[in-house]
């Protein structure tokens, strides 16, 4: 079987090459006005089958939270079939959102996470293109309330930091590694991931899906349809403290690698934290220097780095995708390491140097999966406490981008080298500013929701 790409939102299936993005958050006023807005959005939504050649001025995709489904008047019989973690608020402990990242501080305190019902992800060639579509949506939004989370009461928007996609604050390059999804039922080739890890509604004995149909409950069949061809999206709004990160590299780099010049030591420390040099070159392929020719490579694993001398065990990409590294049995899903499809873009202006300008900047990250618990939460747990593989000498080290306030977590980042272990003391570089769980429904489901068919 091949999936009907016309029924799957484009953002799930591919990365849009747009320089500008905006995320409109909306609280639904009542089912009638919610459905009327959704009708408009469903008529404009971009599917995975839509041609992007030539590239339209802008495209849009739509997500709905559990509270949003409630606000649309979806029948409780169907709602109860959604997994508990989607029905609940994002879990602070699981994600390690403590201190400044505490959910009480999210959205700059301007509204509660429960108020977030809809998100419209806009991508455009220019701000004008985004403004045009935003104005149309706002006109249709009558009776619903737009939630404006930035400090100055604006929308979350971002885009490329430079002339091409990929550069992030902290100077790293993103957009290289994604799961290679097998979008049909053909035999999985090595390295491919079944579409059921991301697309709902096609449960098998091995890969479950939720909402799920139960023979004993006829209404569950419609609940399954509500999910079919959708995905769960974890939306994370993350502040990055660039000045602090650069100060850390400046002071700790030369201490960790006194044999190098200060500049080279800082670059090497940055690479050790990520597992890739800042241009994207994987440390596994080129452990001592970045190499532009290797900067987009993703065909590597950790089999010949069992001592972590090329890539530290706690490096961000080794934690979030340990590839073929041995995992502890207890933490292993039969399918292996959890994978998520990642979309996102930086927001806020670029900052170089070590002086903070007090301007907000960071990353809007979206993580798509068929199970928030088995995929996204699992990665988050692994990030905040590296205890999932025998390679970790103690079980409390952390991903450098995790929050240091997790109880029992260690701020010591171990860098094994041929001449002995080096250790640096991590700081908090990233603060969570908001999180919401959306269902990015199938295109037909959006239309049906707009027609009140699930009430
Ligand atoms: C501000 C916070 C973050 C920054 C700056 C960041 C940055 C990066 C960068 C530069 C890469 C390497 C690019 C690539 O391989 O394509 C990467 C990879 C990745 N990140 Fe993050 N990330 C952040 C937060 C997160 C979070 C919260 C998660 C999920 C829990 C996550 C999951 C991943 C995954 C799964 C990969 C791919 C690893 C691989 O396949 O090798 N990241 N990230």
Image (cartoon, rainbow, N blue to C red):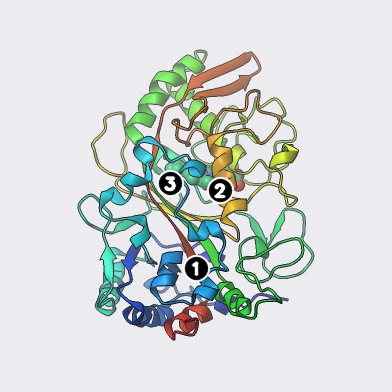
Determine if the C-beta at disc 2 is less than 8 A from ligand 1: no
Mark 2 secondary-structure assignment:
helix
Mark 3 secondary-structure assignment:
loop
Q: Is residue 290 left or right of residue 150?
A: right
Establish if 46 lies above or below 312: below
Q: Which mark is residue 108?
A: none
- Closer to the eye: label 3 or 1: 1
Q: Residue 54, position in %: x, y?
A: 45, 75
Disc 1 crowd rating (10 Å Cα; few below 14, some 14-19, many 20+) is many
Residue found 61% across the figure and 62% down from its top: 198
Identify the residue at the far left of this view.
Answer: 152
Q: Quadrant of residue 416?
A: top right
**Pointer 2 residue:** 377
Residue found 49% across the figure and 61% down from its top: 87
Establish if 418 lies above or below 267: above
The answer to whether any part of residue 146 appears in the image is yes
Residue found 59% across the figure and 43% down from its top: 320
Q: Residue 39, position in %: x, y?
A: 39, 82
Q: Residue 311, position in %: x, y?
A: 62, 31
Q: Disc 3 or 2, which lies upstream in sequence?
A: 3
Q: Quadrant of residue 35?
A: bottom left
- Closer-to-camera residue (112/45): 112
Q: Which mark is residue 440?
A: 1
Disc 3 crowd rating (10 Å Cα; few below 14, some 14-19, many 20+) is many
Quarter of the rendering occupied by the N terminus = bottom right
Mark 1 secondary-structure assignment:
strand
Mark 3 vs mark 2, CA separation in Å: 26 Å
Mark 3 vs mark 1, CA separation in Å: 26 Å
Q: Disc 2 or 1, which lies upstream in sequence?
A: 2
């Amino acid at each position: 079987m091949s999936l009907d790409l016309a029924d799957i939102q484009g953002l799930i299936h591919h990365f849009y090459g747009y320089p500008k993005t905006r995320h409109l958050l909306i609280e639904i006023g009542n089912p009638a006005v919610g459905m009327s807005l959704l009708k408009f959005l469903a008529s404009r939504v971009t599917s995975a089958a839509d041609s992007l050649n030539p590239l339209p001025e802008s495209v849009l995709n739509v997500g709905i939270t559990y509270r949003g489904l409630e606000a649309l008047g979806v029948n409780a019989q169907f709602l109860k079939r959604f997994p508990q973690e989607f029905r609940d608020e994002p879990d602070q402990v699981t994600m390690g959102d403590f201190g400044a990242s505490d959910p009480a501080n999210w959205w700059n305190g301007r509204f509660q996470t429960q108020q977030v019902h809809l998100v419209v992800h806009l991508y455009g060639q220019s701000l004008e293109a985004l403004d045009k579509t935003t104005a149309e949506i706002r006109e249709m939004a009558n009776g619903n309330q737009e939630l404006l989370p930035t400090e100055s009461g604006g929308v979350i928007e971002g885009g490329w930091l430079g002339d091409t996609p990929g550069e992030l604050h902290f100077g790293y390059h993103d957009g290289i590694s994604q799961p290679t999804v097998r979008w049909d039922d053909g035999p999985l080739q090595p390295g491919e991931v079944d579409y059921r890890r991301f697309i709902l509604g096609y449960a098998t004995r091995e890969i479950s899906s939720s909402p799920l149909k139960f023979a004993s409950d006829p209404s569950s069949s419609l609940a399954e349809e509500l999910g079919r061809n959708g995905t769960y999206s974890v939306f994370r709004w993350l502040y990055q403290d660039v000045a602090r990160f650069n100060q850390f590299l400046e002071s700790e780099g030369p201490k960790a690698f006194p044999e190098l010049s200060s500049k080279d030591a800082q670059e090497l420390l940055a690479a050790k934290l990520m597992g890739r040099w800042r241009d994207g070159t994987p440390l596994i392929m080129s452990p001592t220097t970045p190499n532009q020719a290797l900067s987009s490579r993703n065909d590597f694993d950790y089999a010949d780095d069992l001592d972590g001398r090329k890539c530290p065990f706690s490096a961000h990409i080794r934690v979030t995708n340990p590839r073929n590294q041995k995992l502890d049995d207890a933490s292993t899903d039969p399918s292996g390491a959890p994978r998520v499809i990642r979309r996102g873009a930086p927001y806020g202006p670029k900052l170089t140097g070590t002086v903070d300008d007090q301007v907000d900047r960071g990353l809007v990250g979206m993580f798509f999966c068929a199970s928030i618990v088995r995929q996204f939460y699992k990665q988050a747990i692994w990030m905040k406490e590296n205890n999932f593989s025998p390679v970790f000498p103690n079980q409390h080290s952390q991903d450098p981008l995790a929050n240091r306030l997790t109880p029992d977590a260690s701020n010591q980042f171990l860098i094994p080298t041929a001449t002995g272990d080096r250790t640096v003391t991590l700081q908090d570089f990233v603060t969570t500013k908001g999180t919401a769980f959306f269902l990015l429904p199938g295109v037909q489901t959006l239309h049906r929701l707009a027609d009140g068919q699930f009430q």
